[in-house]
Amino acid sequence: MLSVGGGTPCYQGNMNLLNKVSKTFYLHTNIYTLYKRLSTEKKKRPLIAHLSKKKLFKFIMRHLSERIFFYEKSFKKININGKSENDIVQEIIKFIL
């Protein structure tokens, strides 16, 4: 299993390559959940460490709108809102086996 950064599928045909060699999963959540997660991790992420709350929200919206085309090419889209990590893992396993 391989986990890639959010931009990885969007460059140089990576999504097509990933789909060719593996089953890919788009773990879909809402913008507010992404914002909450990223705002607590800002110090560890150089690209967003300097952004204000408002700019971080805009950053997420812009990047998500640019990337959604590639994410939607995944083998399976899984809505993770309100699910535990275990529930998400079990759902992925269901599609792998």
Image (cartoon, rainbow, N blue to C red):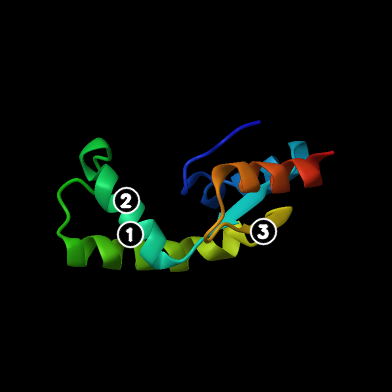
Q: Which residue lies furthest to the right in this view?
A: 97
Q: Position of residue 32 (x, y in %)?
A: 37, 66
* Residue ID at (17%, 55%): 51
C-alpha distance separating marks 3 and 2: 21 Å
Query: Helix or strand or loop: what does disc 2 sit on?
Result: helix
Q: Which mark is residue 38?
A: 2
Q: Marks 2 and 1: CB-CB under 8 Å? A: yes
Q: Seen in the image, is 31 located left or right of residue 69?
A: left
Seen from the viewer's position, the closer of residues 8 and 1 is: 1
Q: Seen in the image, is 2 located left or right of residue 81?
A: right
Query: Helix or strand or loop: what does disc 1 sit on?
Result: helix
Q: In which quarter of the image is residue 44?
A: top left
Report the amino acid beneath label 2.
Leu
Q: How crowded is mark 2: few (under 14 residues within 10 Å), some or many (20 or more)?
A: some
* Residue ID at (63%, 47%): 88
Position of residue 62 relative to residue 9, above or below, is: below
Which tag, 3 or 1, sits closer to the chain's start?
Answer: 1
Report the amino acid beneath label 1.
Tyr
C-alpha distance separating marks 2 and 1: 5 Å
Q: Which mark is residue 77?
A: 3
Q: In which quarter of the image is residue 43?
A: top left
Quadrant in which the C terminus appears: top right
Q: Position of residue 41 (x, y in %)?
A: 28, 43
Q: Position of residue 87 (x, y in %)?
A: 64, 47
Q: Name the residue under label 1.
A: 35
Position of residue 23 relative to residue 65, above or below, is: above
Q: Marks 3 and 1: CB-CB under 8 Å? A: no
Which tag, 3 or 2, sits closer to the chain's start?
Answer: 2
* Residue ID at (59%, 58%): 70
